[in-house]
Image (cartoon, rainbow, N blue to C red):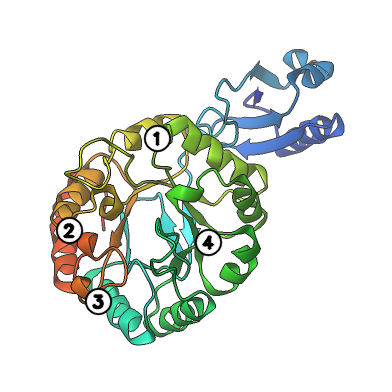
Amino acid sequence: MIIVLKPHATAAHAEELVRDIAAVGLKPLHMPGAERVVLGALGDERILERLHLESHPLVESVKPILAPYKLVARELHPADTIVSLGGVAIGGDRIVVIGGPCSVESAGQLTTTARAVAAAGGRILRGGAFKPRTSPYAFQGLGREGLEILKAVSDEVGLPTLTEVLDPADVELVDRYADGFQVGARNMQNFRLLQAIGRSRKPVVLKRGMAARIEDLLLAAEYILAEGNPNVILCERGIQGFDSATRNVLDLTAVPAIKARSHLPVLVDPSHGTGVRDYVAPMAKAAVACGADGLLIEVHQDPRLAWSDGQQTLDHLEFAALMRDLEPFARAAGRAL
């Protein structure tokens, strides 16, 4: 339920109501706004009725949250959420570009690409130490060694890092080395993993599953927020289609659709969304134009030699050109790079 307090209600009044809500076994939320203080109560609505808040002298209105996801819903949190990943704000006035290789291959490879990403204006370094692959015979990542390389390069170049976590048992390990978790499309509904990440407070980029509806993505995010981690960034990375011209169908309508329903920031991954190097730049520009808060771009010094996903990866010069070309699109959208 959403409880809107009257304009003259004080912080002390709000705290008293929060205690009353918690006392009957519901989860209270306190969201002070510029004009009104809004409280939330999560749980059985019949229990909340015992407090008779509709008749409370300081309560203006009580109404249900209609969406099946409560903490993620814009109903409960009208203002956009800004998530800080390693000190970089995602969801604010600037478009954040996250660049780097699909896989961490070596210290030299990652250092070279990290410097190129930073020089071009990328603000976060991505790189996979654990890789979920369709074939069990494909390269699965360097594991802990990859995390150690990622951390060392981050410290040297000065970019915060984002890397994928595959298993609840690895959350603590990845937490020690990276600035942000990534949950890939295959794990979007790995609820044990989402809960484990929720018990951490580290930012997480949650990718949409290949056959997932927008509601499914938002409910997956709810698992993380329900465990106490509000630092969730959603990512559209393409859904499965029937046409083999592209790896996936990059659903850019998801960006405004998600923003209409949720306060969480939204990224777009045109590398996985298309699977074709030549299509990455046009779709990145389109993503910025339609309101995305940032981009995930795969970058490698020589994509022909990349250990994974080379066909959709930009080289350093292509990435630098994309960053230059994005500036007018960002300005047209009222943002900066």
Q: Position of residue 329 (x, y in %)?
A: 17, 49
Marking on residue 90: none
Tag nearer the camera, 4 or 3: 4
**Which mark sits nearer the N-terminus, 2 or 4?**
4
Q: Are marks 4 and 3 in contact (CB under 8 Å)?
A: no
| SS category of the residue bearing label 4 | loop
Report the Cα–Cα distance between label 4 and label 3. Answer: 25 Å
Q: Residue at x 46, y 49 (%)?
A: 186
Is residue 255 placed above or below 52 in the rendered structure? below
Report the Cα–Cα distance between label 1 and label 2. Answer: 28 Å
Q: Are marks 2 and 3 in contact (CB under 8 Å)?
A: no
Residue type at mark 1: give it: Lys
What residue sits right under mark 2 in the picture?
Answer: 277
Crowding at label 4, few (<14), some or many (≥20) Cα neighbours within 10 Å? many
Which quarter of the figure is the C terminus placed in? Answer: bottom left
Residue type at mark 2: give it: Arg
Residue type at mark 3: give it: Ala
Q: Nearer the viewer, residue 94 or 311?
A: 311
| SS category of the residue bearing label 1 | helix
Crowding at label 2, few (<14), some or many (≥20) Cα neighbours within 10 Å? many
Report the Cα–Cα distance between label 2 and label 3. Answer: 18 Å
Report the Cα–Cα distance between label 1 and label 4. Answer: 26 Å
Q: Residue at x 43, y 48 (%)?
A: 185
